[in-house]
């Protein structure tokens, strides 16, 4: 029988807030000239998130105290803990996949005692010695559009034989969800999928997701659940030739 894996975005998905956006707003990063320019290029689709991350996140250097204080005000989306517990009971591995900053993801998950199998995000950290570490996850030499290449992660899961349930809300999730079997979407991701006529399950809380998965779990396990996708690969994604 096929194996099922869950991949969920963090900002605006597992979390009620987009934590990265909150940080940039509160810490006045968005008004800095290089970030204004990167934001313009992103809106005009002349550059992806990689360029924006390179412009914005280095401005958080030396500001760990402020970041930590803001993290005190963010919270999980309703039903998230119940959903993680469900996955653990079903022995379904959960990957948190984010185009954000690994530091704040790990801080929040630890505080909320959320245990997942892995966190894949941009390796941006405040180190124990106070140093600031900046990096991006994307090692895909064929495409440098995103900081975190979500498509590569999900594509690899599929190549390993997993059935993938993808949960997301934003533009980077459009690429990651392109290789999933089933998509749960909200916000802009739901808009993109609706516009192209791609089947998905809308949600606002993780209770909504469980209301679909729980009574129909056997059909997900055997791959026959409704709205399963096949062959939806975003045209803008590119991968090295094998």
Image (cartoon, helix red, strand yellow):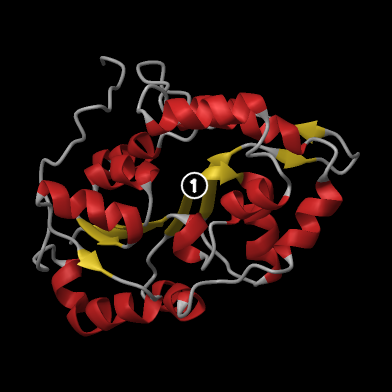
Neighbour tally class for label 1: few under 14, some 14-19, many 20 plus, Cα within 10 Å: many
- Residue 169 location (% of width, % of height): 37, 56
- Which residue: 46% across, 73% down? 84
Q: Is residue 193 left or right of residue 94?
A: left
Q: Looking at the image, how many numbered discs can be counted on the residues?
A: 1
Residue 129 seen in render: yes
Q: Residue at the far right: name it.
A: 129
Q: Pick the quarter of the image with the N terminus.
A: bottom left
Residue 163 seen in render: no
Above or below for 27 versus 69: above
Residue 44 sits in quarter:
top left
Which residue has dot 1 on it? 98
**Going by the image, does 122 lie left or right of 107?**
left
Q: Position of residue 186 (x, y in %)?
A: 32, 62
- The answer to which of 70 and 7 lies nearer the viewer is 70
Of residue 195 and residue 222, the one placed in the foreground of this image is 195
């Amino acid at each position: 029988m096929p194996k099922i894996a869950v991949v969920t975005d963090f900002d605006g998905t597992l979390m009620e807030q987009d934590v990265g956006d909150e940080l940039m707003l509160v810490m006045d990063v968005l008004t800095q000239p290089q970030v204004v320019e990167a934001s313009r290029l992103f809106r005009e689709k002349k550059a992806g998130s990689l360029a924006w991350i390179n412009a914005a996140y280095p401005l958080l250097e030396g500001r760990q105290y402020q970041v930590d204080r803001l993290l005190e005000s963010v919270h999980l989306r309703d039903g998230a803990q119940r959903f993680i517990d469900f996955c653990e009971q079903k022995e379904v591995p959960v990957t948190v996949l984010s185009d954000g900053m690994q530091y704040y993801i790990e801080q929040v998950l630890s505080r909320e005692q959320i245990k997942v199998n892995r966190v894949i995000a941009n390796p941006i950290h405040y180190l124990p010695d106070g140093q600031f570490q900046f990096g991006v996850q994307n090692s895909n030499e064929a495409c440098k559009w995103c900081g975190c290449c979500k498509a590569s992660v999900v594509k690899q899961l599929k190549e390993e034989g997993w059935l993938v349930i993808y949960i997301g809300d934003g533009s980077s999730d459009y690429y990651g969800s392109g290789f999933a079997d089933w998509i749960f979407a909200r916000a802009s991701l739901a808009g993109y999928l609706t516009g192209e006529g791609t089947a998905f399950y809308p949600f606002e809380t993780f209770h909504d997701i469980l209301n679909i998965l729980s009574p129909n779990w056997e059909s997900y396990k055997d791959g026959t659940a409704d709205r399963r996708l096949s062959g939806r690969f975003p045209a803008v994604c590119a991968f090295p030739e094998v």
